[in-house]
Image (spheres, rainbow, N blue to C red):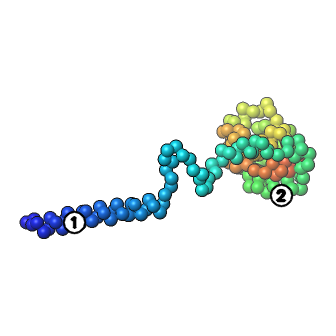
Amino acid sequence: MFDTMRFTKVVGAVCGSLLVFLLTSWAASSLFYTGGGHGGESEAQAYTIDTGEASAETETAAEGPAFEELYAAADPAAGEKVFGKCKACHKVDGQNATGPHLNGVVNRPKGSVEGFGYSDAILALKDQSWSPENMFGFLENPKGYMPGTKMAFAGLAKPEDRANVIAWLATQQ
């Protein structure tokens, strides 16, 4: 059965556990005080996590030189090296691969290589051409420039690389 001594031990154990829990909570809150903003006070944060929102404003302010300046100063030899990233899918020998061949692509009408199966996104733009400006935007972010494109390449982040590869492609007839 349940005698008085056993009942006293159980009540003592529960009270002791609560006391340990309260003391631990008090010690932890003393060691790890975060402020909590009581009374509407705001304290300076120890660190800030960059979410990219502020950098969008600075990127707009510091976009760099215009395309015309980059293209005028482009180095076709450097563009040939950058084209190494494109060789997995594109050729410049007049034969199609995973992507269409890029001989004469600069100022060529979009979606005009015979025998290549283009996406609907590019076929809708057949009346436009691959001007250097269009290629510059496309190479930065293909899926952002032309939603629905089959091209899985993420793009070239550096504007100089894009201008260089376009200058090199202009030499490939």
Q: List x then y, in percent, for residue 19.
A: 30, 63
Q: Earlier in the sequence, mark 1 or mark 2?
A: 1
Q: Which residue is mark 2?
A: 81
Indicate the amino acid at tag 1. Gly
* Residue at 85% in and 42% down: 66
Q: CA distance from mark 1 to mark 2?
A: 78 Å
Which is nearer the eye, 98 or 106? 106
Q: Which residue is mark 1?
A: 12
Indicate the amino acid at tag 2. Lys
Q: Mark 1: few, some, or many residues within 10 Å (few <14, many ≥20)?
A: few
Q: Is residue 70 above or below residue 87?
A: above
Q: List x then y, in percent, for residue 169.
A: 86, 48
Tell me, yes or no, if residue 28 can be seen here: yes
Which is nearer the eye, 20 or 131? 20
Q: Is residue 79 above or below residue 68?
A: below
Q: Quadrant of residue 106?
A: top right
Position of 58 with respect to 45 (left or right) is: right
Secondary structure at numbered mark 1: helix
